[in-house]
Amino acid sequence: MKRSQKSSQGSAWLSYQLYILLSSLGNIVRTPLPSLMMVGVIGIALALPTGLYLLLENVQYISRDWGGAAQISLFLRHDLGENEIEDLADRLYQHPDISNVRLITPADALKEYQTFSGDALQTLSENPLPTVLVIQPASSDNAINQILLEKLQELAEVEVAQFDMLWAKRLFAMLEIVQRGTLILAILLSLAVLLIVGNTIRLAVQSRRKEIEINKLVGATDAFIRQPFLYTGFWYGLLGGTIAWLLITISLWSLQGPVKKLTALYYSKFELITLGMLPSATLLLVGILLGLIGAWISVNRHLRDIQPS
Amino acid sequence: MIIFNEVSKRYTNNYQALQGVNFHLKRGELAFLTGHSGAGKTTLLRLIALIERNVGGQILINGQNLNRLSNQHIPYLRRRIGVTFQDHRLLFDRTVFDNVALPLVVVGYGHKEIRRRVRAALDKVGLLNKEKSYPITLSGGQQQRVGIARAVVNKPPILLADEPTGNLDPALAKEIMNLFLQFNQVGVTVLIASHALGLIKSMGHRTLILQQGHLVGDTYPIK
């Protein structure tokens, strides 16, 4: 008897939750234009960092192989003999972090330069170019290669050691900055979403002031009064997240054509990375969480001010 | 059931609404609370439902000291006290049924139970045929009865009424008072604030008289 009463209370609770879930959606739908504007703003705020994130993913995907191809050039001291150079090359070849060593003699280098720059170097009385060892690192990990570079720099025979593709390194450094910027932007825009949701919920709380007072008078707990507003926040978050997803998907779709054209020019089979299942789910989840948190903070702040009189 | 022990209430603007009020309303008793407007009748009722807190003395409701009741527990106290208001406090965008159902929804009753209890309460105040109406379409007396139905729907052991016959003609006022008598007859402790002295006298019940915040009279009818 007692158990059946309890379970009927439980199902009453569940059906009530379902009821306010739907009725809070109903309240949003009943004022379509303001709601759409509100949800649109949330959508754009969520879409911006998501779009930047996708851009980064794509750039990183394209440049993935460049990082692996980064070679190290060792410019050797002028006063080294041929044997010493051979020795050094052999030693480096044995190094576990190095997969290959290629020797460029001053004569080879001069020849290479001449094919590019014509006769400019002919006027020099002697060959100014140093002997160069081109090191192919075994790893494609930038951090490991950085350490390798520093080790090579310390060798007595080495004048200068540098990455061949410094610009690739610079690109990665820039990407890191953009990445950090995206994170900051995401945090700022999340705060904006919290404020937007919070303000809207504040207005909703105020417009239902009388109802809240009467609910309190007949014994409603704060948790009870909070619920519909939390559900409203939930819907704003979910709908905002959905709009963001749509904005991103439409943008990617419109970019697909030009990107294909460009990659065809590079003889590349590159395909745009789109928003996958997991990032999409994350986007919606973040939207929902921001909606809930914004509503929670706002309701708690303003519920305290409303006491029956 | 309701014990006031040297209870005082002073508002922030230094207005002394109640001063050293003592009385004891026993379980199942019915009493009227009377006095001129501004005498502190409404304040006294508000202290019981914890719409306000007293600043001096003690109030015990069913053995519970209200001074020691934290704000989080106020809702549970209010569920055991039905209150009707002079201005009815109905939600005009909801039907009579939904208004009366409010205290049950707040507690979390199921649909069937809510329907059964709301119907019973509306039946008792004679408004069963109005359950789908909106309060705005009802007369003042009918609105007061909707408020009463809402106050009793949860079967609280205590019922407080603030000027329940405010603007009603004598016949209607008598009807409303008789409703409270009926609830009292089934064991509910009732406290009614009213300045309708003639009506109160004719009802023949204990009467507490307030004057400028002081309890100056506590009279029982001569049997």
Image (cartoon, grey):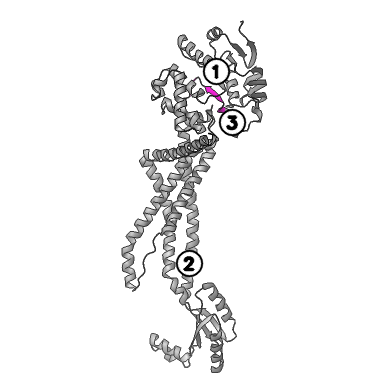
**Is residue B86 shown in magenta?**
yes
Q: Quadrant of the C terminus of chain A?
A: top right
Front position among marks 1 and 3:
1
Percent position of residue A269, x then y: 35, 71
- Above or below: residue A109 compared with residue B20: below
1 and 3 marks in contact (CB < 8 Å): no
Query: Which residue occupies the foreground of this view, A189 or A260?
Result: A260
- Taking depth in this image into account, of B11 and B31 the one nearest to the observer is B31
Find the distance from the CA under tag 3 to the CA under tag 2: 59 Å
Residue, x 41% and y 59% (percent of image)?
Answer: A276
Residue A51, quarter of the rendered image = bottom left
Callout 3: 10 Å neighbours few (<14), some, many (20+)? some
**Residue corresponding to mark 1:** B186
Cα distance between the residues tagged 1 and 3: 26 Å
Q: Residue A108 has which mark?
A: none
Q: Residues within 10 Å of mark 2 (few under 14, many from 20)?
A: few
* Chain letter of the residue beneath label 3 in the structure image: B
Across and down, in percent, residue A74 comes to 52, 83
Inter-mark Cα distance, 1 to 2: 81 Å
Q: Is residue B195 left or right of residue B115?
A: right
Measured as percent of width and height from the top left, residue A176 is found at 49, 65
Residue A38 position in % (x across, y down): 41, 44
Q: Secondary structure at mark 3?
A: helix
Marker disc for residue B74: 3
Q: Do discs 1 and 2 share a chain?
A: no
Q: Nearer the viewer, mark 1 or mark 2?
A: 1
Q: Which residue is mark 2?
A: A174
Name the residue rendered at 55%, 85% in the picture: A94
Q: Which residues are magenta?
A: B78-89
Of pointers 1 and 3, the one earlier in the residue sequence: 3
